[in-house]
Amino acid sequence: MSVLYVPYHLDEHQPDLNVPLPGGVPVAEFAVELPGADVWSRLGRLYDAVATTVERAVRAGERPVVVSGDCTVSIGMTAGLQRAGLDPSIVWIDAHGDLQTPETTTSGYLGGMALRFLLGYRPRDVAGRLALRPPPEDRVLLVDARDLDPPEAGYLASSGVTRAGLDEVTSESLPPGPLLLNLDLDVLDPSCLPGLRYPAAGGPDVPALLRAVRVVLGSGRLAALNLACTWHPGRDDPGGVRERLVAAILADLRDSAG
């Protein structure tokens, strides 16, 4: 197993993200020169490069594993899987819905729109730049998402996106076909993982998260994983909490590959 390390938060390179990747895992650190233009051009350049790398990995018979600083990288990963001839469904494990839009957001935070853009919202901004075919809503499983804003709840009420709690993830609940798993570590209760950018109280503990991840891995249909390490950069890892968590997830992934 090899890891593509993409230390970016949106279009900001974060060399001090400090993801403690375990020894013995080959890592290719990803960096790309972004244009000094608008944010959409910068994100388009970054995610196109991610898509190219993911496509190359799939065609070489590998399962792309990306470790990044946010969830929006999954947009480029989905485009890359599609370029390689796959038609992925999406399993999105996150404390948040990531379903805001530029029109509904009060914060303006683009990371809170990641899944909505993946589903094809305003294609001129992101999807169209990557020739991304938005996955059908009924092939998206949104897991946890306990911290929703009213516009996100309104969208989900009329959409085909399936929702589940972390403890409701079973082999039967997964959407069909190859799976892209977007795993935002802020799904954990903040007491389990310090330093998160957007902590949300009332979350699961580490064993509950690992159980759900193992269900996805056990399906034998995982096509790619984005492990979104959504903590503040430049922070220490008190007690080695992050190190143990990342190592456990990657160990499960390695074991599932046989």
Image (tube, rainbow, N blue to C red):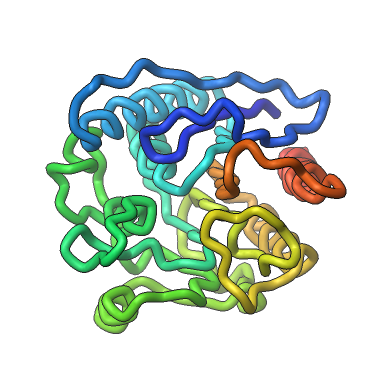
Q: Is residue 256 visible?
A: no
Residue extending furthest toward the top: 33
Q: Is residue 58 visible?
A: yes
Query: What quarter of the picture does the N terminus occupy?
Result: top right
Residue at 67% x, 34% y is 18
Residue at 31% x, 80% y is 150
Q: Quadrant of residue 68?
A: top right
Nearer to me, 252 or 74: 74
Residue at 47% x, 23% y is 59
Q: Relative to residue 119, is residue 49 depicted above or below? A: above
Nearer to me, 59 or 241: 241
Q: Relative to residue 127, is residue 31 depicted above or below? A: above
Residue 247, given in percent of the width and then of the height, sits at 79, 42
Q: Quadrant of residue 103?
A: bottom left
Residue 76, given in percent of the width and then of the height, sits at 37, 37
Residue at 54% x, 43% y is 226
Q: Relative to residue 95, is residue 130 depicted above or below? A: above
The number of discs equals 0
Q: Is residue 185 left or right of residue 14?
A: right
Residue 92, given in percent of the width and then of the height, sits at 49, 60
Query: What quarter of the picture does the C terminus occupy?
Result: top right
Residue extending furthest toward the right: 239
Residue 209, given in percent of the width and then of the height, sits at 70, 64
